Image (spheres, rainbow, N blue to C red):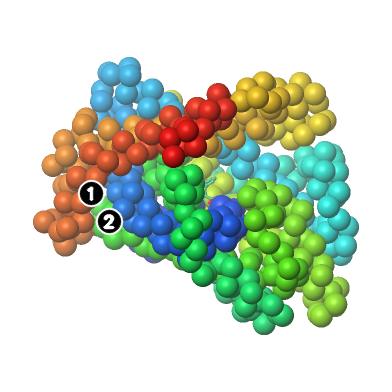
Amino acid sequence: MTTQREEFGSRIGFILAAAGSAVGIGNLVGFPVNAAKNGGGAFLLIYAIFVFTVCLPVMMAELAAGRKSNKNPLGAYQYFAPNQKLWSIGGWLSLITPFMIAVFYAVITLWVLGYLVAIISGDLNLVANPDYFGKFINSSKVFLYLAIITGIVWYILQSGIKEGIEKGAKFMMPTLFIMLVALVAFVLTQDNAAAGLHFYLVPDASKITPAVVNGALGQAFFSLSLGMGIMITYGSYMSRHNSIPGSAKMIAICDTGVAFTAGLMILPAIFSFNPDINPEELSSSSVSLIFTFLPKIFLALESSIGYIGASFIAASFFLLVLFAALTSLVSIIEVPVSGVMDQLGKTRKQALTIIGGGMILLSVFCALSFGLVSFFTEFAIYGGGIKSFFDLIIDVFYETILPLNGFLICMLVSYRWKRSEMHKELEKGDDNFHGSFTERYVDFSLSTFIPVILFLIFLNTVALKFFSFDVIAELF
Ligand code: PHE
């Protein structure tokens, strides 16, 4: 195709769209609980160090590879390593991974929408019942909500980069920030909020084990939307007048800022509901927290602000999560869509139809895998248990392949693309980069220890997930 590639309209539009991708369910619930359980302030510090020393260079590499090649991830791998079958495996992985992650993320997003609708219809008391979740995910309503989510994402993506993704992010992200700050302000006025803050923020170095360090890095990597081809794709829509290092830093600051701020909402809320709670008892799973634990907390507000007030707070929270999930979902679906457009020369609408059709089918399989159809519920056996189709996708793509993709992109930019060329790309739109400390650090880290760390994480996850062998526990 000879048509000019679409571009984001402004630097702030690009940053909001990329931050919209990065800020997701992981930031709002997963991060705060992990931090509270694993050493509070000490975890925060390790997490922040990983964001800036390991994740940021990878993000710059992905953005630069995308902008230079002007392509989707598969196209980018082919651009830097033409006719090399082995390298194009990396490209394929960076297209298939986001597609599969989008499938399960769409299912979680439709649950969020379902809860939001139920709360707005006055059913907070039903939603707060722990049995509600199991019934809801196996009800026929999920197909309706899947259709609505698909419709919203379709509408945003068919409008293109500037009119769709950028406009959507410009509306949803500031709204999300405002709602988050308002909810934090409200939660901090509740009884026992200080106990929650104490648990969240006071450092406890004794909790920092090798497994916690490993978890912090995994969380940071996922949270910044790395290894999913998203930053390569968004980089390909980025103007050459914008600074990649500067934008990457802003995205990382935004993402970490939202994750940190979300903790100021979640932990005090949990403690004001149940002052004696030991955070160790909280499930690490974002899903069970959002859908079974937090609704109870919102309902408990009834005694102080009435049923309508409690429903209003609960609805605000679910709307916040919905916006965070939608901007992430849009970014991840854009990756295979741009793949089909570039590689097969299709129009945006045709690409959306192909990818959307495949995704709906697989999302339906996921939705059927919580008991409705035993073929999908008992889909595979590995790692000492029976796993559903939904579990399998999470274990393979979300847990395992992400660090492998990160490793491959580091190798691609360091050893296939001339390093001096990559630096030229990073210097475009950034007058201060040449000769800076950041430049030397990015060059050194991407070609040495970062790929090593990512590869070790990959091996460790394979051993743990599929062979139930805990390398870290064996070694330390
Ligand atoms: N950073 C996102 C999150 O925390 C990760 C993600 C991006 C997930 C895009 C899915 C799609 O949820």
Q: Which mark, by number, is residue 442?
A: 1
405 vs 324, left or right, is left
Give the quadrant of residue 101: top right
Considering only order in the chain, which callout, 2 or 1, is on the residue closer to the N terminus? 2
119 or 130, which lies in front?
A: 130
Compared to residue 152, the image places residue 70 above or below, namely: above
Q: Amino acid at mark 2?
A: Pro
Q: Are marks 1 and 2 in contact (CB under 8 Å)?
A: yes
75 vs 256, left or right, is left
Give the quadrant of residue 396: top right
**Local crowd size for mark 2, using a 10 Å CA cut-off: few (<14), some (14–19), many (≥20):** many
Indicate the secondary structure of the residue bearing disc 1. helix
Indicate the secondary structure of the residue bearing disc 2. helix
- Residue 337 drawn at (x, y percent): 49, 36
Say whether residue 198 is visible. Answer: yes
Say whether residue 70 is visible. Answer: no
Which quadrant of the rendered structure holds the C terminus?
A: top left
Give me the residue at 68% from left, 26% from top: 385
- Residue 364 drawn at (x, y percent): 72, 32
- Residue 4 drawn at (x, y percent): 33, 42
Q: Outermost residue toward the left?
A: 435
Q: Nearer the viewer, mark 1 or mark 2?
A: 1
Q: Amino acid at mark 1?
A: Val
Q: Which residue is mark 2?
A: 245
